[in-house]
Image: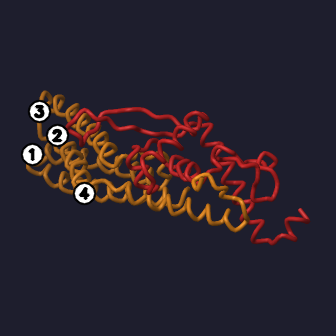
Chain colours: A red, B orange
Amino acid sequence: MAGDGTSGAGGPVGAVSGFDDTIHAPVRLRISGILRHVEQIDFAVLRDTLGVADATLSKHLKVLVDAGYATTAKSRSATRADARRLTWISQTPAGRDAFDAHVEELRRIAVGAEAGPTARDEA
Amino acid sequence: MENDASPGSRDGSAEEVLRGLEADRTALAGRMAAPGWIHVAFALVAAGYVLLPVFDDGVRDGLLPFLLVAVLALLWYQRSVTGIRAGAVGAAAWGVFLVTVVAILALVSVSFALVASLSPWWAAVPAVVCFVVALSANRWFERLSREHVRRGR
């Protein structure tokens, strides 16, 4: 499950500023990354963009929604003749902040990797 | 569970995760393209707006709300068809939008002047120019929006 207690910096996740256990899982990170750049996105478009199954997306979306990082809303479809409705997914301000902080932390780790372990140890 | 692996479990994988996010943004930008006919429809509505001086006040008052509703309907349909409601599209795209609005308003003024000084048929000239300008600007706006998303701001 997400947040296994370890991080790239070699310490516990909670000890590393910006790391978010909920966003830590790759699929949820990718979902958050997409949502960060749209106002709303249809469930099917998000699924196809990520290349994951419906069930996988639903499972990870539920975690994000439960954490207050995403919301869902239903609306009519312009292209469907039947009564099926589109599910629009959007990121909450809290989700945006958490994602930004998480990515910032990843960048810090990536830069640390480029600088080499010695530089990080000295820091 | 494979989907719950730690993306930043090693320094190298943090870079991989960031590259993955970039790839997702590129895929998302690719899906933001609207069908070509929507650009044409937007341009036709803009051209129709420039043709308004041809009509009497009464007809004009009736057509104006119709054109506004047409724009809103096209926006709704575009978002519904692409499945994406874009958030921030960047200053460049908004710059194109602003310049286009100013250009359309200027062409309406030209249309009014031509109808008043020559004949109603002359309004077709700024209307055609408006169609070309709006079509190009719409495609440009979309290209800049997609580029903005691809770059991740």
Q: Earlier in the sequence, mark 1 or mark 2?
A: 2
Which disc number belongs to residue A7?
Answer: none
Cα distance between the residues tagged 3 and 2 = 8 Å
- The residue at the point 24 percent across, 58 percent down is B132
Q: Are marks 4 and 1 in contact (CB under 8 Å)?
A: no
- 1 and 2 marks in contact (CB < 8 Å): yes
- Dot label at residue B120: 1
Q: Disc 2 marks which amino acid?
A: Pro
Residue that extends furthest to the right in the rendered view of this protein = A122
Q: Amino acid at mark 3?
A: Asp
* Residue A51 image offset from top left, x and y in percent: 44, 57
Query: Tag 4's secondary structure?
Result: helix
For marks 4 and 2, the one nearer the N-term is 4
User: Mark 2 belongs to which subunit?
Assistant: B
Q: Which residue is mark 3?
A: B56
SS at mark 3 in the image = loop
Front of the two marks 4 and 1: 4
Which label was assigned to residue B36?
4
